[in-house]
Image (tube, rainbow, N blue to C red):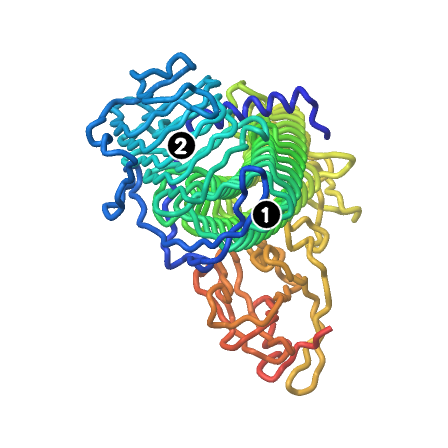
């Protein structure tokens, strides 16, 4: 679906309102540093973008400085705040507010200049103490005159939405040798061009440098690497084409107005993270973007008005808002990133046609959120989970349409997948959604949910009461499996025209479904639903029950209830999408045994395994062969297997890269124990408990490799 000019303009207006407005104050608990991923040290060289867009390589080696406690200003008692004049100690004053050229007066701190490029107005050598309730130390907006801020010492700009220096709708300004401390935010540059900044020292609790613009040119600034934010450099690049930015450690990095750039192997810590603004065809990979303290900043990696970029294999953790944020950014790929303990893992706002695939999204309050009219995005093969009851939603679709959510593992969320009243025409397919309050929480219209496994929830499918504020209608639920839920389906009083067909409601679904809507249908094209063992009789053997099933509370009939099911034909989430193969084992006695098994050879499928699989269907079901990319050291972190959310015991046999026996054990259902091989392994075969003994598979057996 192509976005119209009107839709794009509305999305841009909404995005700018949010960028200019106050962000919601959401603090995320920091992951302990001993759980950090990757190397926290980096010294190398960087690409320095000069004013004319050229680039030169310069050395960069810095030491991290201690940061802040939540909500308080950051200072460093060992850092001397620089001043360019002794007059600063004598020139203590309140905030400076210049809202037009005529405000450049001595009363507002001007000590010289005429406002031209060669002779800018100079505001210099003041110590500015911001009173309680005031927002800015220096505010300059709506000016065409050139100006320079030199040697200012600004303190106590402590308002959440304030800053030491705010420059808006200006051009040709300079910030030189200034310091900002005991404040919430440092410098904000809004809808301006050609602002330079050098030799500034910023110690704040929040953002160090925030640049906001609606056009590429409004990111054209000269921000030198000599600026320090909480003891680390600020890196700002504009107009690059084909360069590589690598090996840097800092608190802020912006790439703007650029293309074909590679950003790799950098560390951004306790600061503003990485912003890509008006960037295309670039790659961001192997970076570490994180907090080790509660610095009140926003996103880890933020793409704004940027397209056709690849964000892959970065470690992104402990960021206050989103690990990765897309705003008005289309056709990007977010691939294979560990995104850990942020408020939201990936947030897609007013952005279309992006691919979010293969990410490990763990411990976030929300896993993935699509909102603001996000459309035609593909959310595929991600592992989204939490073992500590901190995740509210696995995937949230709010004011979003025509997105595909498929083959994702979601576990431990209060709500697995949420579609609000403005979610239209989205498709949820082949997801494994396990353990929580609600599996699918549906308020939207004309969405499709098919072949999903929804198990171990209070309610598998929930239509919440909307009290006539909206109508849940036109949604289709087809071929889903619901098992081990307190209630499989609840439809609200304001629901109508929803269709349920080909679903398997296990554990006697007749008492686990409650339809309070009007006009919902439980049969489509002569195919109803399976309602559990012994629910129907089928005397003529056509696979359809002889009598209808009446659905409480609506009294509507499923006129063609399914009399039986074949587990291999069901939509069992991710497992049902895996390749079914024949695994050959040679026993110690020389016997050859062939075993049907699904092959899990990707991160998301290996993390899924038999999670949430219905115990009613395990008898006679194939096993799962876990195949890794390389041999696993059984002593390494993450090398074991868990039985959380697996409702039956399993045997597991381990094999080396050559197929040799590496050990076996029996794993107990629903336990938190981590089961390991006892030796390096590359393959693991899971079968129902007792299978290895029954088949004669044990020490000395070998896996026949293809």
Disc on the earlier residue, 2 or 1:
2
369 sits left or right of 476 in the view = left
* Dot 2: element: strand
Which dot marks residue 175? 2
| Quarter of the figure with residue 319 | top left
Residue at 53%, 61% (x, y): give it: 648
Residue 404, image x and y in percent? 66, 39
* 69, 215: nearer the viewer: 215
Quarter occupied by the N terminus:
top right
| In the image: residue 253, left or right of residue 682 | left
Residue 105 x, y percent position in the rendering: 34, 15
Q: Residue furthest front?
A: 118
Image quadrant occupied by the C terminus: bottom right
Q: Position of residue 252 (x, y in %)?
A: 45, 43
Q: How many marks?
A: 2
At x 63% / y 62%, what residue is drawn? 619
Residue bearing the label numbered 1? 311
Which x, y percent locates residue 565? 70, 50
* Whole-number angstrom distance, CA of label 2 to CA of label 1: 33 Å
Q: Secondary structure at mark 1?
A: strand
User: Which residue does the image show at 46% across and 33% down from the upper left?
Assistant: 196
């Amino acid at each position: 679906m192509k976005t119209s000019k009107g839709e794009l303009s509305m999305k841009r207006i909404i995005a700018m309102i949010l960028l200019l407005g106050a962000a919601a104050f959401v603090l995320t608990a920091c992951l302990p540093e001993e759980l950090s991923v990757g190397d926290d040290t980096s010294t190398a060289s960087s690409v320095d973008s000069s004013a004319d867009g050229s680039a030169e390589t310069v050395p960069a080696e810095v030491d991290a400085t201690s940061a802040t406690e939540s909500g308080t200003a950051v200072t460093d008692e060992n850092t001397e705040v620089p001043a360019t004049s002794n007059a600063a100690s004598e020139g203590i004053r309140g905030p400076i507010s210049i809202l037009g050229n005529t405000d450049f007066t001595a009363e507002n701190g001007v000590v010289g200049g005429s406002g031209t490029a060669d002779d800018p107005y100079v505001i210099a050598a003041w110590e500015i103490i911001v009173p309680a309730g005031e927002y800015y130390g220096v505010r300059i907006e709506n000016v065409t005159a050139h100006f320079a801020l030199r040697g200012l010492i600004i303190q106590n700009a402590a308002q959440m939405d304030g800053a030491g220096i705010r420059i808006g709708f200006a051009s040709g300004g300079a910030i030189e040798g200034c310091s900002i401390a005991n404040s919430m935010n440092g410098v904000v540059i809004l809808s301006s061009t050609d602002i330079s900044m050098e030799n500034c020292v910023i110690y704040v609790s929040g953002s160090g440098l925030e640049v906001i613009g609606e056009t590429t040119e409004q990111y054209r600034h000269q921000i030198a690497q000599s600026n320090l934010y909480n003891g680390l450099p600020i890196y700002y690049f504009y107009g690059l084409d084909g360069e590589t930015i690598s090996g840097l450690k800092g608190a802020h990095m912006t790439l703007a107005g650029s293309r074909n750039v590679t950003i790799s192997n950098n560390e951004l810590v306790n600061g503003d993270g990485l912003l890509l603004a008006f960037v295309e065809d670039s790659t961001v990979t192997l970076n570490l973007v994180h907090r080790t303290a509660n610095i009140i900043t926003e996103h880890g990696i933020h793409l704004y008005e940027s397209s056709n970029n690849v964000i892959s294999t970065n470690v992104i953790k402990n960021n206050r808002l989103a690990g990765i944020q897309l705003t008005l950014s289309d056709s990007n790929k977010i691939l294979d990133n560990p995104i850990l303990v942020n408020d939201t893992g990936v947030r897609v706002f007013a952005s279309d046609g992006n691919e979010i695939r293969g990410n490990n999204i763990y411990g976030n309050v929300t896993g993935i959120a699509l909102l603001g009219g996000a459309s035609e995005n593909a959310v595929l093969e991600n592992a989204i989970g939490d073992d500590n009851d901190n995740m509210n939603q696995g995937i949230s679709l709010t004011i979003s349409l025509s997105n595909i959510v498929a083959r994702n593992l979601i576990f431990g969320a209060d709500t697995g997948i949420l579609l609000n009243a403005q979610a239209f025409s989205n498709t949820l397919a082949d997801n494994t959604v396990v353990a929580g309050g609600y599996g699918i929480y549906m308020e939207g219209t004309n969405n499709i949910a098919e072949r999903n496994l929804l198990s171990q929830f209070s309610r598998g499918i929930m239509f919440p009461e909307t009290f006539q504020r909206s109508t849940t209608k036109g949604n289709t639920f087809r071929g889903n499996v619901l098992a081990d839920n307190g209630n499989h389906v609840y439809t609200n009083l304001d629901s109508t025209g929803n269709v349920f067909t080909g679903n398997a409601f296990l554990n006697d679904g007749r008492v686990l479904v409650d339809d309070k809507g009007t006009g919902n249908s439980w049969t489509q094209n002569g195919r109803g639903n399976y309602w559990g063992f012994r629910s129907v009789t089928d005397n003529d053997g056509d696979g359809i029950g002889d009598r209808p099933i009446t659905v409480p509370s609506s009294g509507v009939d499923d006129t063609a209830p399914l009399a039986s099911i074949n587990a291999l034909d069901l939509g069992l989430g991710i497992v049902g999408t895996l390749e079914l193969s024949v695994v050959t084992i040679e026993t110690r006695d020389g016997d050859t045994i062939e075993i049907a098994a699904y092959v899990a050879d990707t991160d998301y499928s290996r993390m899924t395994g038999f999670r949430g699989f219905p115990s009613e269907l395990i008898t006679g079901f194939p096993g799962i062969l876990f195949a890794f990319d390389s041999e696993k050291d059984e002593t390494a972190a993450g090398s074991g297997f868990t039985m959380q959310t697996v409702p039956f015991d399993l045997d597991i046999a381990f094999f080396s890269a050559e197929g040799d026996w590496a050990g076996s054990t029996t794993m107990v259902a629903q336990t938190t124990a981590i089961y390991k091989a006892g030796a390096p392994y590359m393959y693991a075969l899971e079968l129902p408990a007792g299978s290895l003994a029954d088949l004669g598979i044990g020490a000395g057996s070998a896996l026949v490799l293809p």
